[in-house]
Amino acid sequence: LSPEDAGAKLIKRNLSDIAAMGGVPESAVLALLLGPDLSVDWLEGFFKGIRSECQAYRIRLVGGDLSSLKEGSFSAVLTLLGRAISPCLRKGAKEGDLICVTGDLGGSQLKKHYDFKPRLQEGQWLAKRLDCTAMMDLTDGLGKDLKALIPESCCAMINLDKIPISRDAHKFSETVAGSPIELAFTDGEDYELLFCLASGIEFEKFRASWDADFPDIPVSCIGQFGVSNHAGLLLDARNNQPLPWTEGFEHFR
């Protein structure tokens, strides 16, 4: 990962959070904590990546802070501010709602964890629709993140054959333990949108509208919320058995 890529990722991963609510980014503040041995050339590259993404997404870097750390240490903390007239939140889905996802999943370790485009326009488009009931971005893995959207007393019935598995997930599975579909559930850092559509929506009609505005970004319906004795869990829609791939990135593990 180059310093330019690292700086760009710092901006984009925060943009993904704005996208997850259908928001518009506006300004940012940056706090840097630097060790005395940090290369000036590396830092210049890091700022080059930050500047590039700020210009691309029209973000104003309006301030921040600079502090020292011990040798061998570096930390960058970004606070990104945005606005949303009608934000789409994580809690809002109900029994019967469809579970959908943009793009494809898994294998982010190969490149996607830094080489991605935040789904800002897509998030704004979804937030304007009355039939989009909940939304978030996928950062810790589908198996872990989806739990945050499941309505009370419901489970997530997943159609495994509808999971959009990336080529990188297939490629990465050849070198690590785990099948491509397991990686699609657990890798994390996909930076795709996970969202819900109100019960009764015909997904094919929705997809036709989506494709008209985002022809290069696939969208998939991967399941539906239902009432079950396994409330809060992800179930295989074929046999109602809990799926094993429910762990993702744990920040404090």
Image (cartoon, rainbow, N blue to C red):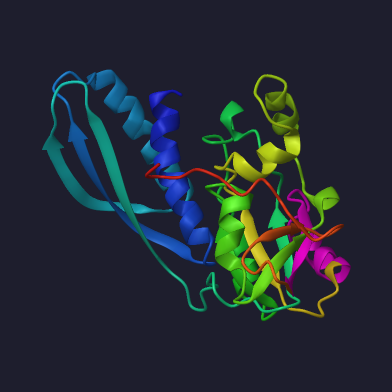
Tell me the quarter of the picture where residue 171 sits.
top right
For residue 166, say whether it is visible. no
Q: Is residue 78 left or right of residue 15?
A: left
Closer-to-camera residue (20/189): 189
Q: Is residue 165 left or right of residue 94?
A: right
Closer-to-camera residue (235/109): 235
Q: Is residue 88 left or right of residue 34?
A: right
Q: Residue at x 72, y 21 (%)?
A: 174
Q: Position of residue 90 (x, y in %)?
A: 54, 69
Number of callouts: 0
- The vertical placement of 82 against 114, above or below, is below
Outermost residue toward the front in this view:
229
Q: Position of residue 230 (x, y in %)?
A: 68, 66
Q: Is residue 208 shown in magenta?
A: yes
For residue 44, say whether it is visible. yes
Q: Residue at x 52, y 67 (%)?
A: 21
Tell me the quarter of the picture where residue 137 sits.
bottom right
Q: Position of residue 29 (x, y in %)?
A: 26, 52
Q: Which residues are magenta?
A: 204-226
- The vertical placement of 155 against 42, above or below, is below
* Quarter of the C terminus within the rendering: top left
Closer-to-camera residue (151/239): 239
Q: Is residue 36 shown in magenta?
A: no
- The vertical placement of 233 against 50, above or below, is below
Q: Residue at x 54, y 74 (%)?
A: 91
Q: Is residue 94 left or right of residue 206?
A: left
